[in-house]
Structure formats: structure tokens, C-alpha cells
Amino acid sequence: MSDGEERACEGPDSMYVKLISSDDHEFIVKREHALVSGTIKAMLSGPGQIAENETNEIKFREIPSHVLSNVCEYFTYKAQHTNSSTEVPDFPVSPEISMELIIAANFLDC
Amino acid sequence: MAEMLMETVKRLQSRLRDNPESRKLLKTLKRLRDVPMTVDILVETGVGKTVNSYRKHEAVGEAAKSLVTKWKKLVPQTADRANSHVKEPSHSHRGHKRPREPSPEEGGSYAEAEERGYHTIYSPSPPQHKQYSPQQEGRYQSDQYESPEPEPSPPPPPPPRKDLHHIKPNKEPSKNHHHKDGERQRQQQQHTEVRRSNEKSREWHQSPPQKTAKHMKTTTTSAHDRKEEKKKGGDCSEGRRQQKETQPQKVEDDYETPTMSFESFLTYDAPTVVKKKKKSSSQQQQQQLPPSSSHSRPSQSSSSTFSSSRGTRSPQPSSSSSSSKYIKTNGSQSTKRSHPDSSTEALPTPEKRRRVVEEMPMLPEIPLPAIQPNYRPLPSMDVTPLSPQRRKGPVCNDEDDAGFTGKRLNSKMVVYSGSKTAYLPKMMTLYEQCIRVLQNNIDSIAEVGGVPFDILEPVLERCTPEQLYRIEELNQCFTEDSNELWRRHCQHDFKRESRKEYESWRELYLRLHDEREARLRLLTQNITSAHANKPKVRQAKIAFEDSFAKPPRDVRRRQEKFGTTSGSSAASTFAACPIKPKAAAPSVHPAEPSGPSSSQFIPAPSSSRSSGPSAAAVGAVALGKPQPKKKAPMMAKTIKAFKNRFSRR
């Protein structure tokens, strides 16, 4: 990807944000993608000086990495198919993690 | 002196005909060679023909051939003169037909000639026949070898005659021609005609002028083909050729289809393309000959058939000519027809071939999907702008490819791959997606973990009472919240019941469910007991358990013969029925030959098996040792005979 910009999470207007799972896995995703999640959106742009605003990092202590990775995939999936006139395929969810994923989805409001 | 010679020749000729022995034939041929042959004798006796018939004989073929060539040399002048004659009444069909063929008048005369010749076939006139045969035959053969030379030069006039003569060369057709020509009685013309006709006779079948052209071209080829064909001998025409009867030829003609289209279809795949025009013209000419067409049609068809068969062999019209040659052998008329047929074939064949060829390229294209220029592999997730076009792309490509199939060029047909539900109507959130997946796999839900009931409520709503019960068992926390769900189940299954005090819907449901189960069980017991008391309709019983089964007569005979008769029922039955013992024996007691004997009469193999041991026991007890020994040969027989059939039941 040639963004012309470093994948930096510094600054308030950085292009990317970092999502950290409970097992300290860091997922760097585009800011606009992450804002799909209402919770993340509130965390990053909410009123008040939250630490996340500065560092653009969010730590999720309840969400393991295998779940968070799926969440990030969903971000991309949603970004791609939103405003798409073509038929949207199902987002592949494996049954094994569906329970945990539903918890995360419920938490993240996405 | 001449008369004596004539008589000698006739005698020898008759000897040739009557004695198929090669030694005697050789002798006779030798004698004939020594005889100072003249053209008159040849013509009158037709001995040339007779000798020519032995051309292909194993032993005397060579001698016959040499003799015929020798005699041919006797009549070189007359052959040359044949070309000069334009319209000869031509005893041979060829003679008549050839001059007629080039023009419609000739065609008419051709028809007449054919007709006459046709008639003459049935009423042979010996002198004419003899006259024509030797000359023509000789010329025919000589022409065959001379084919390439004389043909190309003179187109219409000589070809007709040549054609006429050409037809004659065949023994049979020559005979026919002779018959026909007898009326014409132009020996000299015949000679010349014979020569020319020989050269072009092959082509004669085809239209005169065109035929001649064909002959010219095909004579060479035809000559070759003829040789080839002769050698091959596989052609039916050759067989027919061998026949020297006109009638069979005619019969053959009758069998052939009279339609031109059929010919063209026959030669559909034939590679002959060169002489289209000639053939077409010949066809036309031939078609102009209505009366002859009647004859010609069968011959045409025959010729076409032959030519078609040959066509594959030789890509040139020579094949047709060669085939026509064969046809000629069958009969002059047939040969004539074959000429036009071949010509006709040539015309429709190339046309049809062309047509077919044109059509051919289309066919393979249809089933294969064309590789469209706009083809793109599945886009990656990042290729957002392309996604809208993705689905429409293939559809449009189909339409864009003009040369694709020719179908659906303007229709808007949206192609869906996969089921409709594969694509969601709207974007679902991750939560909804997960719910969907869980709903599809309710039975896999075991321990939920900390998931609150509210989150999973959509999933549980879809549970059956059993599923719900199971999940509640695993996750007791759901029990409190699932009352509503149970209420729904109760209303669905037990509409009339109402719940008691302090009874939750869940309890109510469970109670009602248990009651129902109990009732069902009770009913089942009653039914089974009732059925037990009834007499059984079908029951397997052992036949001839105690009594003696009388074996069939032949079996009894064999028993007496081999000493396999046994006093006991088991033993006798075993000996009497060799079929089943094999079946039952291996399955039950391979070493117990008497066992299966009783099983023969038992329909079910299982029952046979069950009875086997008992019968075996009985048999063994009754007879003791000698029986097994006696049965050994029978057993071996049965095992061998029914090894495959009754291997293992």
C-alpha cells in the first residue's frame, strides 16, 4: 500500500489506529474502518481527554486476539460493501468463535 | 478356314466357361493363343470377353490378361476410328449415350439407348453381344492403361463415344451394351467408340461432356482406381462386377436410392472437390435425360454410393469414376448412371461440404464460454471501485462478445451464481452475522460462557423445545429467562392445556410433554401385545422336516447312477437338490454336506441356514460316515457349478 504516509498512529488525525487485544496483539487498522464500531468511535472522538485520543491506541481486555482479528476483518468487509450496489456476500464467521465474536460484537456495537 | 477357326474359338470359349479348373483353363487359353485370332472372330464369339473374365483368376489371370492384350492389339485401327464417329447408334450404351450426352438430344438418345440397352439386357442378342464384347473389352482394357493420353484432348464428341465404349469394357456391362448395341450394329463405330469409351467409359456415367472431362482426369485416376479397386476387391460393386448377369445389376440399381440428395449426402464427406463444375454440368446433363434417369437414378445412386465409398479413398473424382467403373461392371446402364451420379455427386457434395464446413465452425463454439477480454479475477477486498462492476461484468461480457454464441445478445440476463440467500439484502452488522451463524448451528451450542440471554435470544427463539431444554441444562442461567419461550412452545404444542398455579410455562410444558410420552408408550404396548396375540401371517417353516422329499426324476437317476441316494430325508434332499447345498454349505457348515440338503426347500437363506444345522445333524445321525463320502463327488460338482452364484449368502 502506498499511502504516502507512515503507518503512524501518532497525532489526532493519524490515518491508523491501533487495537490491542487481551493477549497484547496489536492490530493497526485504518481509522475510518475502526470508526464503524460505535464503541471505538466513542473512545477515540469522545469528549474529554482520553488517553486513546493521544496515542490512538485502544486496549480491549476482554477480547482475545483471535476474535479481534475477525473484528478487524469485519471492518474491512463493511467498508468494502457499504454503498455497493452489488449483492453483498455473507461475512464468514466460523461457528467455533461465534460465541466470543458475538460478545465482542455486542460490546463494540458493530 | 475362318469358319473352322470360329468354331474352334467357340469351342474353346465354351470350354473356358464350363471348366473352372485352372489347368484346363490354362490349356484352353494356350490354345486360344495359338489360334490366329481375327477381329471378326473376336466380335462374333465374344471370346475376348470370356477370356477377360478370367483376368483375375488366380492361376490363369496372367495368361488371360496377356491374351486379351494381345487381342486388343488386333483392333487398334477400329478404336481410333471410334472417335471420329459422332453419333453412332452404338450398340453399346456408351456409343449411343456418348454422342447424345453432350447435347440434350443426345441425352434423349442416351435415354433411348439406355432403354434399349436396358431391354436388350434381358434379351441378349448373341452376335451383337459377341461383336461388342471383345472389341470393347479389349479396348476397355487397353484404354484403361491408356487413359491419361487420349482423354484430355477432345472434349465433347469423343467423350460421348468413349463413354459409351467405356461402359462396355466391363464384362457385364459390355454384355449389356452388346445387347443394346446389337440393335445399333455398328461394329466399327463400336470399335472406335469402344476405344474412346474405354478411355472415358469410366467417366461415361457422368454427363457426357463433363463426363469426358472427368473421364480424362479420372480415367487416369480411374485406371488407377480401377486397378486399386480390382485389387481391393472389397467393393460390392466388384462383386457385382463379377456377376455377369444383367438382372442382378438391375436389382442393384433398384436398391439404390434414386434421389440426388441422397447421393450428395452420401458423398457429403467425400473430399472430391476438383471437378465440381464438370460434375455439376454432368449432373445437369444427366438430369436432362429423363428416361435414362430412371435407369440412371438407381445407377446414379449406386454410383454415388460407390463414389461416396470411394470418395474417401481417392480424393478426386476419379474415385467416383472408379466407382462408376465398378458400376459399369455391374451393368452398362448402371455405369452410365454412375457417371452422372458421380458428377452429380461431385456437385452437391462440394456444395454441401462447403455448406457443412461453413456450419461446422459454429458448433464447437457454443458450449465453450469465450474468454472475455474484460475478464478479471475475483477482486481483492481493497478493490472497492471495481466491486460494483464485478457482477455486471460477466453479464456484459457475454453480450459484448458478438461471436460468442449468437444468443442473448441483447437480452439482459443477470447471472446469479449460488443461492439467493448467498447475498444479503442489506449490510448486516457483525452481531447480526454472528446471530445468523449461531442460528444455523444451534445443535452445536454447548456451553455459552458468559453470554447473557438477551444476546442469544434470537438464537434461542429458533430452538425446538428439545434444543431449548438441552441448552438450559447446560446453561442454567437461561432457565430464568426462557419462560416466554416456553410459553410459546406450550401454545404451539398443547393448545388446550392451561397451567396450574405457580407453574411456569416451562414446567407446564415439561409436564405435558411427559404425559404425552407416557400415553404414547402405553399405546405402543397395547398394540404390540395385540399384535402378538394375532396369528402370524407369514412364518418361515421347514419343509420336509420329517417326511421324505421325492427328488425329480433326473436327479433320482443321477442318484442311482452315482450312488448318492440316501435313506434319510436330509440326505436324500441334499442329493436331490444340488443347488442350494452349495449356497447353504459354505455359509453354514462348509464341511457339512448334508446340512444344506434340507435347505433347498426353504425360501429364506437364513432359515435355510438355521435348518441347515438341524438337517445336517439329522442327516449325520441318520446316515453316519459313509454318506459324506458318497456326497463328496456330488458336492464337488455342485460347488463347481454354482461357485459364483451361491458364493456367500
Image: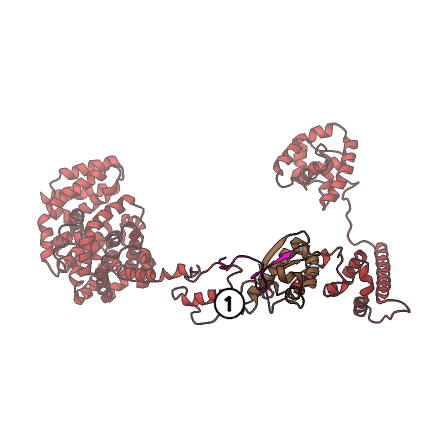
**Residue B205 x %, y %:** 23, 57
The residue under the point 73% across, 57% down is B445
**Splitting the image into 4 quarters, where does residue A107 fall?**
bottom right
- How many numbered badges does the structure rendering display? 1
Instruction: Compare residues B535 and B313 and report the one nearer the observer.
Output: B313
Instruction: Compare residues B364 and B422 and report the one nearer the observer.
Output: B422
The residue under the point 67% across, 67% down is A48
Q: Chain of mark 1?
A: B
On the rendered structure, is B462 left or right of B141?
right
Inspect this view and state whether residue B558 appears: yes
- Other-residue count near label 1 (Cα within 10 Å), few / some / many at <14 / 14–19 / ≥20: some
Residue hosting label 1: B388
Q: Quadrant of the N terminus of chain B?
A: top left
The residue lying furthest to the right in this view is B501
Q: Quick check: B334 above or below B41?
A: below
Write down which chain is painted brown: A
**Splitting the image into 4 quarters, where does residue B107 fall?**
bottom left
Callout 1, which amino acid? Pro
**Residue B278 x %, y %:** 21, 60
On the rendered structure, is B272 left or right of B536?
left
Q: Quadrant of the C terminus of chain B?
A: top right
The residue under the point 72% across, 57% down is B443
Residue A13 falls within the magenta-colored stretch:
yes
Q: Quick check: B377 above or below B37?
A: below
**Residue B240 x %, y %:** 30, 50
Instruction: Compare residues B58 and B266 and report the one nearer the observer.
Output: B266
Inspect this view and state whether residue B259 appears: no
Q: Quick check: B198 above or below B575?
A: below
Highlighted range, magenta: A1-20
**Residue B47 x %, y %:** 18, 45
Write down which chain is painted red: B
Residue B297 falls within the magenta-colored stretch:
no
